[in-house]
Amino acid sequence: MANTNLANAKTAKNDEFYTQYPDIQKEINAYLDYNPDVFRGKTVLLPCDDPEWSNFTKFFAQNFELLGLKKLISTSFAPESKKFKEGYMPSLFETESPIFDIDKTRTHGKIFVLDHDANNSGRIDIEDLQWQYLEGEGDHAEEEIKEWFKTINIAGIPLNHQEELNAIFSGTFVTLCKAEFSNSGNANIQKWESYVKGPANRQQFLATALEWVSKGNVENYMSTHRRDENINEIKTYFNTVIEWVDSKFDDVYDEMQGLNWGELYERFHHLPLNHSELSAKVHELMHDDFVTNRRGVFEYVLGGCQDTKLLNVRLFDKPTMRKVYQSQTNKAKAELVSNCPYCAIGHDANRQRIWKLEEMDADHVTAWSKGGSTAIENCQMLCKTHNRAKGNR
């Protein structure tokens, strides 16, 4: 029965069952060779399938003082939440404890904590592990784990948000995702890097793939798919978005990297876009000195070149505005009309109003999007109301 359970566990990819103690020791020694105090004063959180079996828990507990740890926290899943439930028997460690509960042992996860010499032996080690039942199964105790994880900083480098989520929602799904999206040897990374900020080993590709496929609801998506044994959906969606972007533009620009292509795909992939026309317009705008936000160029052209706010087109400078204002105002006073051309042809109380400079905005006579330049010859001053109403006309 033991061998059968072990084989089942390995099939389910429960890492702690087949990650050997010597392998863990070798990996940790590499950290210690780099910095002997790398773990000193730190809290280590181990979201395990079962801390009583986990070689990770055993290693950190047995070497607690040697590593100089502040605290060790190890969590487990409830037996009833696992794929393979047959043959479960609570350990003597659990059954002999005064808090043992015959019902909770199958329906609740457990938390094991080591932070002091509980048995007064003069040293802190595995014999001092204290435990209690979690509120939920273990994989439904994510809020508890999030709170513990706020204290984690194993290597002296703050964990980013995705690295924290990987630990909180650890399971087969995360393991498979990391093998695909966090593998620096993946042949697709060179293409991905054109559109997604890396590096792979800090989980940036995975974070982006999750953001896109979940439409921004990453934590819920990871919780829902935590025990999935394939990543077909996220892998297919991510590659579909990348291929769509790659097919729409002839050239790759640095400004493409890190844009929310997943959102742009959802908004524009159904449109009959001509990649030659898109590419030509992008090339034109990327070399336009009046465009100050080049990262907005791609959304602008995909959206039919309508929203010029995305480009942050360079405005008229203050000397130009003052010169045009003075010219318009002198002419308006001589003709007894408003210095706003639109007010001057109106029929309301503002027809003869002379606006102050700060009450007016500089406007392109011929819209920039229609070929108008940001030069004094194409500048007019409008009252703020008419400038907003004119828009891109």
Image (spheres, rainbow, N blue to C red):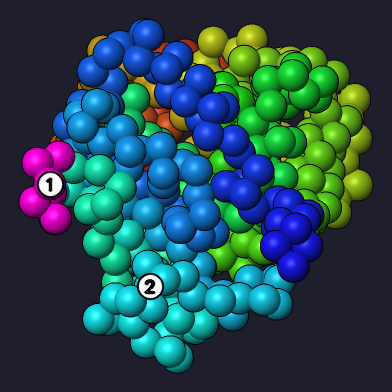
x, y (%) of residue 390? 49, 47
The residue wearing badge 2 is: 94
Viewer-nearest of discs 2 and 1: 1
x, y (%) of residue 187? 82, 20
The type of residue carrying mark 1 is Ser
Residue 130 sits above or below residue 268 on the image? below
The residue wearing badge 1 is: 121
42 displayed left or right of 248: left
Q: Earlier in the sequence, mark 2 or mark 1?
A: 2
**Residue at the image point whose x is 50% and y is 60% from the top:** 50
Residue 88 sits above or below residue 294 on the image? below
Question: Which residues, given as a range, are shown in magenta?
Answer: 117-123
388 displayed left or right of 6: left
**Residue at the image point whose x is 53% and y is 34% from the top:** 21
Q: Quadrant of the N terminus?
A: bottom right
- For disc 2, the neighbor class at 10 Å (few under 14, some 14 to 19, many from 20) is some
Q: Secondary structure at mark 2?
A: helix
The type of residue carrying mark 2 is Glu
x, y (%) of residue 325? 27, 25
**Residue at the image point whose x is 18% and y is 42% from the top:** 124
Residue 192 sits above or below residue 111 on the image? above
Please give the label number shown on residue 318: none
**Residue at the image point whose x is 47% and y is 25% from the top:** 25
Q: Quadrant of residue 346?
A: bottom left
- For disc 1, the neighbor class at 10 Å (few under 14, some 14 to 19, many from 20) is few
The one nearer the camera, 147 or 286, is: 147
x, y (%) of residue 387? 40, 44
The one nearer the camera, 267 or 156, is: 156
Determine the main secondary structure of the stretch shown in magenta: loop
